[in-house]
Image: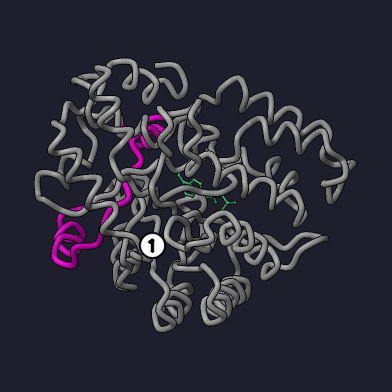
């Protein structure tokens, strides 16, 4: 399979009426990383525009090479290679101006009902966009989140189509994690559009014990909590159990849960964020046949189908739904009724359901 071929292949395997069914279905995108979803044309524009560059000299060769890699399509041998894509992108979103442009274009990608795209329907009816606040020469972490919030609130004035999740990276120091959660709480208290916090980043990095108090503080402030969990076979069981003890509302991936962890997840009804193309392309799941979504569907457990990072994975939310519906082995071969039920579970799992 060529890179990002899964969603594209599934789309082309649908009948016109199946495609129309998916396009008009109300769908929630609850697991999309801002810097992983910037359209390549936006990055190319930002790379050209030195006005936006916080450190113009360093944007040159490394960024160029990284953009070329992303444009031609990344092939990953394993998930750990994935994280090296981001430093070059971060060079380009290091100022409030460039971050605002990137955020706007990502909102547009998911929410615009452009008549030339996706049959005139938006990819998603509702978006929770997540991002990890970075401190740069031009922005504090608080200013980073404010910039993203400003764009989300400007794009969705009614307040019922988009919200922000603030991500903590597993590599963050205790001090930075505390600062980030404090920023998220401060903005929520100020009535800004921050609805939750996330834990993401290289799945084997960091000491999860140190994060407990920060997620506890976020929960007490009324923020939703979602955690990337058991994304690789090397994630140790005690760590997974520790993360589950934070009592998250949703789980990202949850690919390698053992029976004890699965029981806990089933009993607490935590929604599992499923990213089919991402798992296949990062090679954490061999095939759709072996994908853990089957387990959750069989047990009638809440899931939401999401894209993760549309830039490297070259997918779309409609493409991920096509993977549910296309006949096996290209897709899961689910019926309209089953796909509609999955879409509804996603809408019901929003941190903000207005
Ligand atoms: C874990 C991931 C991820 O936050 O800078 N990220 N973390 N697993 C994944 N699955 C493949 N995909 C993306 O967006 C990019 C950052 O999101 C996290 C990584 O930390 C990445 O650097 P933001 O907007």
Q: Image height check: is 146 above or below 84?
A: below
| Disc 1 C-beta below 8 A from ligand 1 | no
Say whether residue 63 is left or right of residue 287. Answer: right
Badge 1: residue crowd in 10 Å (few <14, some 14–19, many ≥20): many
Please give the range of residues in magenta: 258-285
Q: Quadrant of the N terminus?
A: top left
Q: Residue 313, position in %: x, y?
A: 48, 31
Q: Image height check: is 67 above or below 298?
A: above
Q: Nearer the viewer, residue 205 or 190?
A: 190
Q: Nearer the viewer, residue 75 or 277?
A: 277
Say whether residue 314 is left or right of residue 317. Answer: right
Residue shown at 76% from the left, 63% from the top: 139
Say whether residue 229 is left or right of residue 35. Answer: left
Q: Residue 173, position in %: x, y?
A: 60, 69
Callout 1: helix, strand or loop? strand
Q: Nearer the viewer, residue 174 or 339?
A: 339
Dot 1 corresponds to which residue?
Answer: 226
Residue at the extreme right: 57
Q: Is residue 263 magenta?
A: yes
Q: Is residue 225 magenta?
A: no
Q: Image height check: is 128 above or below 67?
A: below
Q: Residue 203, position in %: x, y?
A: 45, 51
Residue shown at 45% from the left, 24% from the top: 4
Q: Image height check: is 246 above or below 40?
A: below
């Amino acid at each position: 399979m060529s890179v990002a071929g899964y969603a594209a292949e599934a789309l082309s395997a649908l009948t016109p009426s199946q495609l129309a069914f998916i396009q008009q279905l109300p769908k929630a995108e609850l697991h999309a990383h801002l810097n992983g979803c910037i359209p390549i044309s936006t990055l190319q524009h930002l790379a050209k525009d030195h006005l936006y560059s916080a450190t113009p000299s360093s944007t040159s060769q490394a960024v160029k090479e990284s953009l070329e890699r992303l444009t031609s399509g990344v092939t990953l041998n394993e998930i750990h290679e994935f994280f090296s894509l981001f430093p070059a992108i971060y060079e380009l979103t290091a100022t409030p101006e460039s971050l605002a442009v990137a955020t706007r274009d990502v909102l547009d990608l998911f929410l615009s009902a452009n008549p030339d795209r996706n049959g005139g329907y938006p990819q998603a009816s509702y978006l929770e966009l997540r991002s990890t606040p970075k401190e740069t020469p031009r922005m504090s972490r608080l200013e980073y989140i404010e910039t993203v919030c400003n764009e989300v609130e400007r794009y969705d004035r009614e307040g019922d189509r988009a919200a922000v999740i603030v991500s903590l990276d597993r590599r963050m120091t205790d001090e930075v994690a505390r600062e980030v959660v404090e920023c998220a709480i401060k903005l929520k208290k100020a009535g800004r559009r921050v609805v939750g916090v996330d834990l993401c980043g290289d799945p084997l990095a960091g000491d999860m014990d140190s994060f407990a108090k920060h997620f506890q503080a976020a929960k007490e402030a009324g923020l939703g909590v979602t955690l990337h969990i058991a994304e690789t076979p090397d994630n140790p069981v005690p760590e997974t159990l520790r993360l589950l003890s934070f009592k998250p509302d949703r789980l990202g991936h949850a690919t390698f849960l053992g029976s004890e962890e699965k029981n806990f997840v089933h009993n607490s009804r935590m929604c599992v964020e499923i990213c089919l193309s991402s798992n296949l392309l990062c090679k954490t799941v061999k095939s759709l046949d072996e994908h853990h979504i089957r387990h959750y569907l069989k047990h009638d457990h809440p899931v939401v189908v999401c894209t993760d990072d549309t830039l490297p994975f070259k997918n779309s939310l409609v493409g991920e739904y096509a993977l549910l519906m296309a006949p096996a082995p290209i897709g899961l071969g689910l019926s309209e009724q089953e796909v509609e039920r999955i879409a509804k579970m996603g809408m019901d799992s929003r941190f903000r359901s207005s």
